[in-house]
Amino acid sequence: MKDILTIVIRLTVSCLLAATVMGVCLIFTSNAKKHNEHVKEQKVMYSLLGYSGGATIPDSLAMHEVYRYVLTGPSKQSIAYLVPQGHGEEKGFLFVNINLDGELIEAKPVSLTEAQSLDPESRNKAMLGAADTGYDVQFADKTFVVTDNGQRIAYLLGGKFQGFKTFINVMVAVEPNFSLIGFEVLEHEEDPGLGAEIEQEYFKNQFKGKPFAALKEIDVVKAPIPEEYLKALNGKISEKDVLKVREQYKDGDIYALTGATISTRAVANGVKGIVRKFAYRVEVLDKVLTEQQLAVSF
Amino acid sequence: MANDKSSMQLISRGILSENPIFKLALSMCPAVGISTTVMNGVLLGIAVLFVQVFSSVTISIFKNMIHPRIRIPTYTLTIATWVTVIDLVLAAYMPEAYAKMGIFVKLIVAFAIITMRLEMFACKESVSDSFWDGLGMGLGFMVGMVVIGFFRELLGSGMILGHDVLGFKPLLFFILPSAGFFVVGLMMAFFNWIEIYYKRSKGLK
């Protein structure tokens, strides 16, 4: 009996000690970690738009983040967007609630600064305050509308889908006509050497420049990549030739990674799903915004 | 006991005569699963090296306070704490390294080699000896992973450190986890053969 007690006490004490060490470490590092993730996201976003490796970003370029939430009430669901009203601290966000038939339920401004909107917790709280009582808010995804001098030049879509092992977290860049600019893998846990090859440039480049029509029907073929295409994907030929080869293959399917067909298929279907759903959603949102003449920043 | 051993001996023992992978045959899961490229081997090796050294030293410091009946849970707890701390610190202050190593660091909690070194060595020996032993074992593990990674990367994808050296892919089989067993098995046999040969030549002298 005495033995059991000492064991229990000692184990508890060691667990508490370990928890303290980990907790203190978390407190000291969490801010830096969040900052790093934000910086990484920014970097990925700009590199997708073609401003990689310290290229100067023109001042006319602006990003407008749109957050999508699912509101679940006692009897019905609706989709709510958090849309920026303009850049700058005082402008705030607009809460746009749209029902499943694509009709506006209500639109009202929310007091939320841009800095606050970056923090999921304060953003969720603001959404909860804006929604009617009895509604539960659930964050769905965020989208960046990229404008150049007020003209939309691209959308950046965040998304997650099931890979071979766990979720694959990606960011997809599409043009206003929804043809693919490219995508970047933010997070994944695929097998090194097999599924992890989805990070490689030659794989990601296969998606570059796919028109929306082709992307809607995209599939995976289990065949080796033709040599000239592989060269183009690796960027081993001149830029002009790359464009020519890409043009030739742009309506084609995605060549599966050797030994990782499931990962390839997951990425192809995931990207396809993200873009298709977004194309529908942004149309609904745009319709509502123009019909109701709501002023937003993009 | 090991008190008469110098730090160099402790390190070389970890790399050669008691190499975790080829001699002790511990932590074979990562050796088989991850070692598809040289770079993976180096990164996992570095991660293991740090966790092993920190855990060995910690256990060695607290060795008199650990109740013998709960030593294994305590070891696991120590390793888990260090893995978490290293994971957090890397994520916060070295985002570049974390992007490459993060996935490996999280794997380490369940590594047999670390628990085994704590049980066999750190809980009996002095702090400095435990440090050198941890360093040796970590380096030995890294060397093993790099050697396996070298063969698998070369034979599986025709590359070394991501550079195309062969220009073609000889056998995709070597990338697959099952091939890891073959490579590890052959390497083990090779290491043992060298040792026997070395001992015989010495005996003959």
Image (spheres, coloured by chain):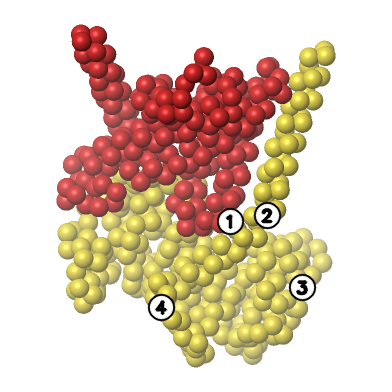
- Expressed as whole percent of the image width and height from the top left, the position of residue A211 reads 35, 73
Q: Which color has been applied to chain B in this rendered view?
A: red
Q: Label 3, on which residue?
A: A130
Residue appearing at x 57%, y 21% in the figure: B125
Q: Label 1, on which residue?
A: B92
Residue appearing at x 40%, y 72% in the figure: A53
Q: What element carries label 4?
A: loop
Q: Looking at the rendering, which quadrant does residue B200 occupy?
A: top left
Q: Which of marks 3 and 4 is nearer the N terminus?
A: 4
**Spatial separation of the CA atoms under disc 4 and disc 2:** 33 Å
Q: Which mark lies nearer to you, 3 or 1?
A: 1
Q: Which color has been applied to chain A in this rendered view?
A: yellow
**Left or right of B58 in this view: A48:** left
Q: Which mark lies nearer to you, 3 or 4?
A: 4
Q: Is disc 1 in the same subunit as disc 2?
A: no
Res A55 label:
4
Chain of residue at mark 1? B
- Expressed as whole percent of the image width and height from the top left, the position of residue B110 reads 53, 32
Q: Label 2, on which residue?
A: A28
Q: Which amino acid does label 2 sit on?
A: Phe
Question: Relative to the observer, which residue lies in front, A152 or A136?
Answer: A152
